[in-house]
Image (spheres, coloured by chain):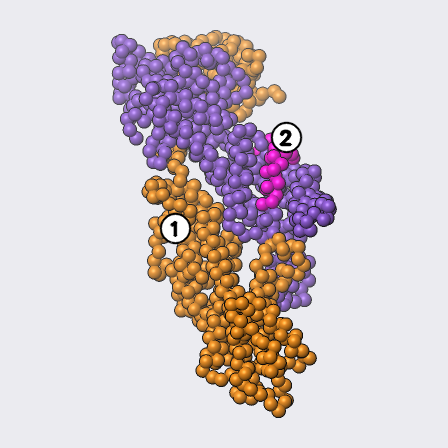
Amino acid sequence: MTATTPTFAVVGHPNKGKSSIVSTLAQDDSVRIAPEPGTTRACRRYPMKLDGRVQYALVDTPGFQRARRALAWMRERETRADLHRTVVESFVAAHRGTGRFEDECELLTPVLEGAGILYVVDGSVPYGPEYEPEMEILRWTGEPSMALINPIGEADHVESWRAALSQYFKIVRIFDALTAPFEKRLELLQAFGALREEWRAPLEQAVRALSQERAQVRERVARAIAELLADELTLSVSKRLPEGVDARQPEAALEREYQEALRERERKARAQVEEAYGHHEIERSEESFSLLDQDLFSVEHWVLWGLRRRQLVATGAAGGALVGGAVDAAVGGASIFLGTLFGAAAGGAAALWSSFRLEKARIQGLPLGGRELRCGPTRNRNFPWVVLGRALHHNARLAGRTHADRGALALEPGTGPGWADRIDRERRAALERCFARLRDGDTDPALVQDLAELLAPIVAQADVAPGIG
Amino acid sequence: MSAQGLGRLVDLALQLEADAQRPAAELRRRDRALGRELAGAGLRGDAWVEVWLERVRPPAPDGAGARSARAVRGLSALLAAFGATLGSGAAAALFHYDGTHPVNVVRVIAFFVGLQLLLLAGTALLLLGGRWRRFVPGLELAQDVLSLASPGRWLRALQRLLPAAQRDAFARAGALALRHRRLYAEVERWTWLCASQLFGVSFHLAALGTALGLVVFTDLAFGWSTTLTLDPRTLEHLTHALATPWARLWPDAVPSSELIAATQYFRGGPHIVRDPMSSAPWWRFCAACMVVYGLVPRAALLGFGRYRLRRAVRRTFVHQPAVLALRDRLEHAVVETTADAAEAPPAPRDTRARPAASAPAPGQRCAALAWSGFPFDVDASCRLVGLVARSQRRAGEGALSEDAAAIEALRREPSDEIVAVLVKAWEPPLLELMDFLRELRATLGDGRVVALVPLAQAPDGAPVVPRAAALGPWRTAVEQSADAWLVLHAPEREQ
């Protein structure tokens, strides 16, 4: 790290969301966030590195615990305004390691080393004068500063805070660490550049890099979903049947094995997507997460996530029309497009008929004799859409989730059915063609890449319009 | 078969499998460093994957890829030798002439034309993809049966003849293909096809060589005979149709009607071979049939198979998802934003049980102290929690000397009154408050109850008893203090 590396110390009263802000901006869910004051006991540095080079660093600090007493100590030694900073330095030097003012020494150290000050308050609780000693001490350090109003609760006291903070800080911004969308986070980082002119360029470069990285994350997610779809559409399990054995019992066991394998694959994809977004410690609550974690095979679930009947018929008809059209072309149009017509009708009807039929195990003869029980790959047209709907919803929840949010992933009302309406018809048809190729056993290694490229803009919609899915 | 390409594909697959087990951050750092080195090299297509692979898994003579490549070469040689032996044997049998029965051209046509066309049809059926399987009933079963007869499938049996190291390498490559069936199915498919066509080419080359050898080094007599009542004109039509591809280039290899009429024989007849020398022109027709209907299609299929295999290897090298992820790691800067060190563990808590004073009874008189900007009316606040304030003071704001004065004043209050410290429930219990409470206790001495009363603010601005969740930090602070007469006073909130 160079001397000009922009560094920002996130300081303030205990329990006012300092760690939440750091967690959100650093995209780090390992930051401890707890209601007890004093959870953060020592400074912790979060350097933003681009290919190993530090662009800027955030420093999470303990909160002020004895600001009034500290200020009183400083005032006793105050001589002139130009010596305020020296007095603060003397304070830290006098108390470091003594056990008194431990938190104040710890939080003031990065500031005295040249870090910009990000003073955090909770805009959902009333302003109180007990904050003034903290702000006064920070002012005495002479470092550039910005106040962040982080509304943790529902009540709104932002205006009174803004009025008070404006007297101590040139820049006062509102930033909800729990819900801030990605673009807002970048905006805030860019605003840090206003604190010192020489910090502007590295911060802008960092913002560009973060923005590009986000685009890469979307592509990684699209690839993970494409791989999931490809694997699930081609998955099959089989078991050789001994002669004379009643197939009913192994049939049920094989169907369970098949469904469990599909679920397991989905769980793996979910972990990959969470990894892509840097979420490593997402709490999984069975109650709230059950719609994503369980019931992949419940009919209700298929109604929720699959295509609507109209869309199913349309995609089935499009596939049928393609085959019928080939017949028409083969006879040079002599069939007066009856092939296309019948193909579309048959495709649509088949898609509708199979829309809620799950895969059953079936017995087939082996070339060298004997019988084999096989389950999958599924030919159900709705199945990939159910998987895709769930995956996109999971992505949307993660894209909008900050790293300070420690709640369980939950469904929001109003999402689910109809999600596919937001995908334009051409793209839906192209996706269906990819699904058909996978169902038909097409083993072209580029197929997953094609599918991922089709999915990338849909995945990106989660950032543009949070809540898709 | 492109053995080296297949060997490197095995290396790539093993490397990608190993990488899948390593932490993503470590892979990003490793590959980005390589990516920055390779950025200026102007690599195109799949070259960058090969260069990357060379760096992370340099080709080694005893590596899995090299051993697999040697196994593939060994198997190809075995398959070619097997094909050549069978081809030579088949030609020796079909062109056998011991002076009694001439070489029956009908048999040669049946074997080197009819059977070959059937086998080519079988190969074409095997090449049909999944979409066809859905529309053509029975195709899947036919393909399964045909694939069992495909010489490419004999590789598994032939591998037993390989040295142990190559056998293991081949088995590992097979297991790898099975684990990632969708990724390597194309490569596997064209590998089998190439192996089958290599067998076919060897078979036909050896058959042709043997036949020509017999023509050159022995005297053969040709004729044609069949139980079927075949008119010589029918055979003439058939042979002329078969000779169409070379009729202009090599007219001598088209049997004349005289030749056909003169060389028909019956095994029971007295003169099976009337004039052996006059039947000799048949060899040209037989050789041309072997080349055009046996060797050329197999050689063409081998060429096509090798092209498709190379293409499949290249596409698998470049387009499989793990390689796309690798490209992402090579091309894009590593962005790290998380902490550079683990967080310090939380402060240990004193979990020892301590005697606790009983909570104040309703109507208990108290000396009230509003702490640090407590914003509500003190009397009303005390009434809210069932206390009666007999005196009011403020502390925790202004000068420190005011705190000391408040403590001194509280000391002088009647000892039967408890001290109620009113605090804002939405603020955390800071060490400054705990310092004050410690000093207060030191002044009051043991026995006098100090009640900590946190109050919240209702939407209309009035004080309310806080919700239980908001009391957690206050309860912890009281529990962690060493003061047995410090209590948290927060009557249950009415819902």
Residue kind at label 1, given as amino acid type: Glu
> At x 47% / y 36%, what residue is drawn?
A217
Q: Which residue lies at the image location 51% right of the left edge and 55% below the top edge?
A: B186
The quadrant of the rendering that contains the C terminus of chain B is top right
Residue type, label 2: Gly
Within the image, what quadrant is residue A133 found in? Answer: top left
Membership of B104 in magenta stretch: no
Asked whether B347 or B156 is in front, the reply is B156
The magenta segment: A407-434
Secondary structure under tag 1 reads helix
Q: Which chain is purple?
A: A
Q: Which mark is residue B349?
A: none
User: Quick check: is A423 in the magenta stretch?
Assistant: yes
Q: Please tell me whether residue B116 is drawn above or below residue B475 in the rendered image.
A: below
Q: Are marks 1 and 2 in contact (CB under 8 Å)?
A: no
The x and y percentages for residue A310 are 70, 38
Q: Is residue A79 left or right of residue A205?
A: left
Q: Residue at x 55, y 82 (%)?
A: B279
Q: Nearer the viewer, residue B74 or B164?
A: B74
Q: Residues within 10 Å of mark 2 (few under 14, many from 20)?
A: few
Q: How many marks?
A: 2
Residue B469 is situated, as x and y percent measured from the top left of the image, at 53, 25
Which quadrant of the view contains residue B345?
Answer: top left
